[in-house]
Image (cartoon, helix red, strand yellow):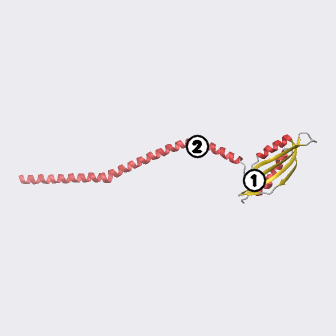
Amino acid sequence: MPSRLKDRTHLYARIQRWLFAGLVVFAFGFYLLVFYPTHRRAEELQAAVERQRQDLELARERSKDLPRIAAENEALTLRLSQSKRVPRQSEWAEFVRDLTRLGNQESLRKFAYKYGLARHIGEFAQFPVIVSFEGDAMNVYAFLRQIEDLPRLTRLRSILLKSLEESPGQVRAEMALNTYFSTEP
C-alpha cells in the first residue's frame, strides 16, 4: 500500500504542477490577449479625449474673439463698399453724367468738358479732363466736395476760380482732373 500511496501522491503532485503550469499559461495568455490590448486601447481613448478637450478649450478661446472679428469684418466691408473703384473704360459716360448731375444739384451753369488723350499705365489708363462751369461760390465748393465722394478714383490736378464781375458771389471755375479706368475687359 505504501507504494500505491506514493504513486498517487506523485500523480497528484504532477497533476498540480500541470494545473499550475496551465494556470500560469492561462494568466499569461489572458494578459497578452485580453488585458493588455484592452488597457492600451483605453489609454489611447483617454489620450484622444484629452486632445479633444484641449482642442475644445482652444476653440472656446478663439470663439471669444468671434464677435470682435465679425464687427471688424463688417467695418471693413463697409469701407470697401465706400472705397474708390477703378471702372472699365465703358463707364466713362457715367462719370460725365455724375458730374453733370452733381452740377445741376448745386445749380451750376455752363458746363463744358475738354478731354485729353488717355495715358496707358499697365492695366490702367489715366484720362485727363478739364471741366469748366459757373455758379455761386458756395455751390462750387459743395460741388467740389461731392466730386471727392464719387465712388470712382478721380484726382483733382488744378482748379482756377475767377470772380464774375457782373454778378457778386458768382465764380467761373475751371478744374483739371484725372480719372482712371481699367483697360482690361
Q: Quadrant of the C terminus?
A: bottom right
Q: Position of residue 27 (x, y in %)?
A: 27, 51
Q: Nearer the viewer, residue 48 or 163?
A: 163
Element carrying mark 2: helix
Q: Which residue is mark 1?
A: 180
Residue 49 drawn at (x, y percent): 44, 46
From the viewer's perspective, is 84 left or right of 19? Answer: right
Crowding at mark 1 (Cα within 10 Å: few <14, some 14-19, many 20+): many
> In terms of depth relative to the viewer, which is nearer, 25 or 80?
80
Residue 107: % across, % down = 86, 44
Residue at the image point whose x is 60% and y is 43% from the top:
69
Residue 122, located in which quarter of the rendered image?
A: bottom right
Residue found 79% across the figure and 43% down from its top: 145
Vertical relation: 86 (above or below) 164? below
Query: Residue 175, percent across and down?
Result: 83, 48
**Residue depicted at x 17% and y 53%:** 15
Q: Amino acid at mark 1?
A: Tyr
> Of marks 1 and 2, which one's residue comes earlier in the chain?
2
Q: Is residue 61 left or right of residue 135?
A: left
Q: Residues within 10 Å of mark 2 (few under 14, many from 20)?
A: few
Q: Amino acid at mark 2?
A: Leu
For disc 2, the marked residue is 66
Question: Is 79 on the left or on the right of 107, as rendered?
Answer: left
Dot label at residue 115: none
Q: What residue do we see at 81% from left, 47% from top?
A: 158
> Furthest residue to the right?
166
Position of residue 123 in the picture relative to residue 65 (left or right):
right
Secondary-structure class at tag 1: strand
| Distance of label 1 from label 2 (alpha carbons) | 38 Å
